[in-house]
Image (cartoon, rainbow, N blue to C red):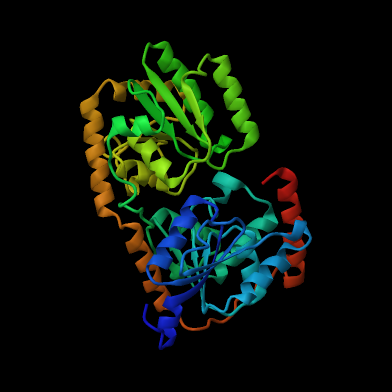
């Protein structure tokens, strides 16, 4: 990497990234930015596993037992001398602290969906909404993957002139087609029959119980089918309920609950599965859809209009009403029509070919960084005040810990 010799090069070469890199998507983005030549001061509430990367300096920020989450994040943010701050995503303790701090460094915010789709998804406390709005208003650039999310970000507080389209792609060298028999063997899955994969977080919002009920209907119709459920970000009570329901439906031999998988295992699961199902009531546009398509796995999805910016029903994905009956009918149709599955797989490949790779997305992010000035006029929130905001963050952190969030 060349030595930075002007302000723009310094912005490109060194950034402070605030985000939960314990999650797969943020972790991949951090790695991609570092691989693109950025030196990253990573501030994360969970360890990323990237601490040995030559371009990544990781600090795991804890809440000190909930005593002062604001102080913990403030110290970490101030300790980074990086000239640019990059936040993934808008609704987090780190993001809220930065917006309250009056820090004058330019900031790029990457939104994902749930952090701005308040009414559809999280329905946060009014104060949490306001804190997230502070982050959106403070951002010099707000990157979004779709026109839909751009509108949602503006509705939540972002300036329209700050919106920048940036689609974060996937690593095509990692997510790619493979041998289905070998993948099933590697993952210890049945060689025969059909396999459905649930790759979304194991939480009620993602309606995995509906997939389970659909599986029972398909099994009762005499189809040889298994469901594999990823344990990613599992909510313990929901997992226990699903296991109990699988027993009630006599599906214990047909439902395979996997612990959180490595990236390598996720690739193998997409390659092993025939269909990946994700039917939440709200979404931005999930990376799991791209990952499945890249591995020649058919996506069955909720019929959300926003998805149509990227995929078309019965061409590159299949839309289905999120009920057990409708899902069971559509899955049986797909299993009974291999030529239709192959046509949709080909459509998915075309979508992937039109979208940027993860490396190209990281390069685009750094291009956006180069357009920013060395400093920005600090946008101090009118309310809450810094002192009150600090008290709010401590209170919210304690509430989250009590709720197991």
The residue closer to the viewer here, 85 or 231, is: 231
x, y percentage for residue 184?
A: 35, 30
Q: Is residue 64 visible?
A: yes
Report the side of 101 relative to 111 (left or right): right
Q: Please, is residue 253 above or below residue 231 in the view?
A: above
Report the side of 97 relative to 325 (left or right): right
The single residue placed furthest to the bottom in the displayed view is: 5
x, y percentage for residue 324?
A: 46, 23
Residue at the image point whose x is 53% and y is 81% from the top? 376
Q: Please, is residue 95 above or below residue 280 in the view?
A: below
Q: Please, is residue 332 above or below residue 347 in the view?
A: above
**Snapshot quadrant of residue 133:** bottom right
The quadrant the N terminus occupies is bottom left
Residue at the image point whose x is 52% and y is 58% from the top? 155
Residue at the image point whose x is 57% and y is 37% from the top? 203
**Snapshot quadrant of residue 235:** top right
Report the side of 28 relative to 360 (left or right): right
**Snapshot quadrant of residue 302:** top left
The residue closer to the viewer here, 248 or 189, is: 189
The residue closer to the viewer here, 160 or 168, is: 168
Residue at the image point whose x is 72% and y is 62% from the top? 69
Q: Is residue 100 visible?
A: no
x, y percentage for residue 306?
A: 40, 47
Total numbered badges shown on the rendered structure: 0
x, y percentage for residue 178?
A: 28, 39
Q: Please, is residue 168 above or below residue 302 in the view?
A: below
């Amino acid at each position: 990497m060349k030595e930075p010799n002007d302000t723009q090069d310094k912005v490109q070469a060194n950034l402070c990234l605030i985000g939960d890199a314990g999650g797969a998507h943020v972790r991949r983005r951090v790695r991609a930015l570092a691989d693109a030549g950025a030196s990253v001061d990573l501030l994360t509430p969970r360890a990323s596993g990237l601490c040995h990367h030559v371009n990544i300096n990781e600090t795991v920020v804890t809440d000190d037992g909930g005593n002062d989450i604001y102080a913990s994040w403030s110290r970490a943010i101030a300790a980074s001398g990086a000239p640019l701050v990059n936040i993934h995503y808008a609704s987090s303790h780190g993001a809220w602290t930065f917006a309250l701090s009056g820090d004058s460094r330019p900031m790029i915010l990457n939104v994902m969906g749930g952090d701005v789709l308040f009414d559809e998804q999280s329905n946060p406390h009014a104060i949490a909404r306001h804190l997230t709005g502070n982050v959106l208003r403070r951002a010099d650039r707000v990157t979004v993957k779709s026109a839909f999310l751009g509108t949602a970000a503006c509705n939540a507080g972002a300036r329209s002139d700050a919106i920048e389209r940036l689609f974060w792609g996937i690593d095509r060298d990692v997510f790619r087609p493979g041998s289905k028999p070998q993948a099933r063997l590697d993952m210890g899955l049945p060689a025969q029959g059909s396999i459905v994969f649930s790759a979304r977080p194991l939480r009620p919002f993602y309606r995995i119980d509906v997939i389970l009920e659909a599986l029972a209907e398909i099994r009762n119709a005499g189809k040889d089918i298994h469901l594999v459920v990823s344990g990613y970000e599992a909510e313990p009570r929901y997992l226990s309920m699903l296991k109990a329901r699988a027993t009630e439906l006599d599906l214990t031999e047909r439902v395979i609950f996997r612990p959180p998988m490595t990236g390598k295992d996720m690739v193998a699961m997409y390659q092993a599965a025939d269909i990946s199902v994700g039917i939440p009531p709200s979404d931005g546009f999930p990376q799991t859809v791209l990952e499945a398509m890249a591995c020649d796995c058919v996506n069955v999805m909720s019929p959300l209009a926003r998805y149509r910016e990227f995929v078309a029903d019965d061409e590159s994905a299949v839309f289905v009403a999120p009920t057990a009956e409708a899902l069971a009918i559509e899955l049986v149709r797909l299993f009974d029509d291999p030529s239709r599955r192959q046509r949709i797989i080909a459509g998915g490949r075309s979508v992937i070919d039109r979208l940027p790779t993860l490396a190209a997305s990281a390069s685009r992010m750094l291009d956006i960084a180069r357009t920013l000035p060395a400093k920005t006029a600090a946008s101090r929130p009118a309310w809450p005040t810094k002192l009150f905001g600090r008290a709010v963050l401590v209170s919210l952190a304690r509430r989250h810990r009590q709720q197991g969030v």
